[in-house]
Amino acid sequence: MSVARRIEKLQRDFLWGGMGDEHKYHLVNWQKICATLQHGGLGIRNLSIFNKALLGKWLWRYGAEHEALWRRVVDSKYGSRWGGWCSHRVHVPYGVGLWKFIRAGWDSFSRHSAFKVGDGSRVKFWLDTWCGNQPFRDSFPELFRLTRVPDASAADHLQILGSSHHWDIIFSRQAQDWELETVTALMELLYSYPIQWGSLDALYWRPSSHKVFTVRSYYSCLVQPSRSFFPWKSVWKSKVPTMPFLARLMESLLTICFYTAL
């Protein structure tokens, strides 16, 4: 049994049985207990999911801290994929599997991350998510089938002309009349994208308003919310008057008592 499961067992036993040793039945599924207040739960964190969110911090740091010593050690041992955003998969059957376990979460992590294009040398034009909410391969599949170099970088199609830039997309053939509208939509989307002049490509976190990874935002992404509605405010919001109200009430009563005494 993993450490997380042992701790969760202690949590469940304490919730339903308190500090006593007497066995009591668990009346509600633990996943329901771990749901948020808005979805009818108690807001207790699921430790297994929370652990994945914590490990996601290392995936973020691997793509952001290129000169860090620990990152260079991992890179020298396992190597990095194109662009250097993550390492290769770990297939070593022996030794400590710490990084192997961290690296296994990349597929889930990458679904919530995207890229900011600077010079475009480390971002795949068609295959990475950088302009819009999905890769161009999925947004414009008919144009992707016409491209000459499917794995080209953004820099391969970007030309810097003084203070302006130009996108040069080369297809295997001329676009047909019925394809011109799609080509126009792609070009409009490209020219609406703000290029970060003089900067390098960077990783950013889509669930966060600040575009920086946080464990809390990743945990929220990993938790599967219930679709059922729960009137949580009427249950958890206190009906007791707030302290400012009580203070004003006390002040009014003291004032009345003072003038009555006079």
Image: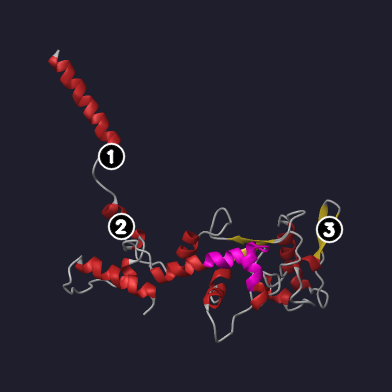
Image check: 140 left or right of 54? right
Q: Which residue is mark 2?
A: 231
Q: Is residue 241 visible?
A: yes
2 and 1 marks in contact (CB < 8 Å)? no
Tell which of 105 and 90 is nearer to you: 90
Q: Earlier in the sequence, mark 2 or mark 1?
A: 2
- Secondary structure at badge 3 equals strand
Q: Mark 2 belongs to which amino acid?
A: Pro
Residue 248 spot, x, y in % from top left: 26, 29
Q: Which residue is mark 1?
A: 242
Tell me: residue 90, above or below residue 49.
below
Is residue 62 found inside the magenta-colored segment of the image? yes
The circle drawn on residue 195 is none
Q: Earlier in the sequence, mark 1 or mark 3?
A: 3
Q: Earlier in the sequence, mark 2 or mark 3?
A: 3
Is residue 220 found inside the magenta-colored segment of the image? no
Q: Which residue is mark 3?
A: 160
Instruction: Kindly report the distance in space between the C-alpha atoms of the residues bearing marks 2 and 1.
Output: 21 Å
Residue drawn at the location 75% of the way across and 58% of the way down:
191
Tell which of 73 and 28 is nearer to you: 73
Image check: 151 left or right of 223? right
Specify the principal SS of the magenta part.
helix
- Indicate which label's residue lies in the foreground, 2 or 3: 3
> Quick one: which residue is furthest to the bottom in this view?
93
Q: Quadrant of residue 193?
A: bottom right
Q: Which residues are magenta?
A: 56-74
Q: Residues within 10 Å of mark 2 (few under 14, many from 20)?
A: few
Residue drawn at the location 38% of the way across and 72% of the way down:
4
Q: Mark 3 belongs to which amino acid?
A: Ile
Residue 258 spot, x, y in % from top left: 17, 18
